[in-house]
Image (spheres, rainbow, N blue to C red):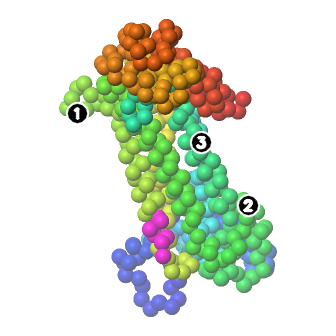
Amino acid sequence: MTLWGGRFSSKLNDRAWDLNSSLLVDQRLTLQDIEGSRAWAGAIHQVGILSDKEHSSICVGLAAIREEFTAGRFSFAPSDEDIHTAIERRLTELIGEAAGKLHTGRSRNDQVATDFRLWMLEAIPALTTTMSDLQSALVEQAELAGETLMPGYTHLQRAQPILLAHWWLSHYWPLQRDQERLQDLTKRVSVLPLGSGALAGVPFDIDRLALAKSLGFAEVSQNSIDVVSDRDFAAEYLFCTTMIGIHLSKLAEQVILFTTAEFGLLELSDAYATGSSLMPQKKNPDVFELTRGKAGTLIGLLTGLLAVLKGLPSTYDKDLQEDKAPVFQATDTLHAILPVLAGALRTIKVKPVRLRNAIDSTMLATDLADYLVNKGVPFREAHAMAGQVIREAGDNSLEEISLEVYQKIGPFDEDVFQVFDPRMSVQKKNSIGGTSPQSVKYQIQRIKGE
Ligand code: ARG
């Protein structure tokens, strides 16, 4: 049974049918479609299109379908073009003629947009919960790190000493912004399209506000033409998932680097590392590499949908059927990555000695300049003098240069050698957002809402 056979004299070519069918993708909207139909039945019952009896029989039928579906007993028929068709077909089998009244005033255009939004209203909290656990893993590592020091990098060159905890938390905040973005998106998802018909609205006096309420939407759409083709929410959602992917890939890349023999700052637990079929010594960071790789796939899903949306001529166009697969794939991708990543991060072993030894005295050159600033030297000059010290030292440590040499370069005193304590350097970065133990403690308190 198609929902549109009346004006056609022959059936659709088989392969065109396969191309047209979206059931494999949109059966994921089964429960939302049932829910939308239940609410729609209520709305058209209220305006007298359904009798009490028809209404309750539709409700009973839909409940039975829900039951079949959740018990895994619902079977699709070859004629089911999409999930909407499948459910109407089954409803007809179960309750007979009354089922034929359900689609009054409704189009699959407003129906599918409603189902998709309902789905997303559940998908967003599910995603944020999973993300929160990964964020907790980062906070746990930060707390475990205590006051452990590590080299901080810019341009991937050793720059200044930082707290390891500060580094862990630097990956918490991007994800927190992603969480906020998803929260903000929710209000644009929570707008009801149903009651817009195919494009022009409905000729019955439907109470759309009540309909929205019964489905849990915060608002109703204000323009039927717009809302049947509005997929901004899907594109925005994909932007959010892409941004999450990019943030995770950045974290992953750093973990991959830090676990190499060359860096040797972190070690993966065996439960989250893989071996090589050829080289017995290998311990590969596949989980992190896949995270980095999948960020590329996520970018593709976003740009793919944007390209589908570009230049669509009218309200609903079948191009829009391409909207769901990328959204589902992006969601599944993140649900595959996030928990594994959380586990992998929780079990990472830190190598504090390697971390500490990776901080050499040149990383305190800025502190050396700041030392001179405290003696009244303008920063530009102080910077040049510290540079001269670096040049003088060559391959040696800055601590090995004699005081005489220091004093030839600038107004240095005995106490210059105290500069080379990285702990002191870190402690001084004490304003909000800095790497001092106190600032990091405050950061953790902020995260935990203490
Ligand atoms: N399967 C379609 C989709 O996912 C449902 C809407 C079809 N509307 C239509 N007028 N053919 O977009």
- The residue under label 3 is which amino acid type? Gln
* Number of numbered discs overlaid on the protein picture: 3
Q: Can residue 103 be seen in this view?
A: no
Q: Nearer the viewer, residue 437 or 80?
A: 437
Q: Which of marks 3 and 2 is in front?
A: 3
Report the span colored magenta.
305-311
Q: Does the magenta stretch include residue 399?
A: no
| Residue corresponding to mark 1 | 277
- The residue under label 1 is which amino acid type? Ser
Quarter holding residue 35? bottom right
Considering only vertical position in the picture, is 117 above or below 248?
below
* Numbered disc 1: secondary structure: loop
Going by the image, does 331 lie left or right of 14? right
Q: Nearer the viewer, residue 121 or 87?
A: 121
Q: Which of marks 1 and 3 is in front?
A: 3
Quarter holding residue 202? bottom right
| Residue corresponding to mark 3 | 176
Task: Please give the name of the residue rendered at 39% of the width and 73% of the height, measured from the top-left corner.
Answer: 19
Task: Please give the name of the residue rendered at 51% of the width and 56% of the height, measured from the top-left corner.
Answer: 238
What distance separates the C-alpha of mark 2 from that of mark 1?
A: 54 Å
* Numbered disc 2: secondary structure: loop
Q: Where is residue 154 in the image (x, y as percent from the top left)?
A: 43, 34
* Numbered disc 3: secondary structure: helix
| Residue corresponding to mark 2 | 218
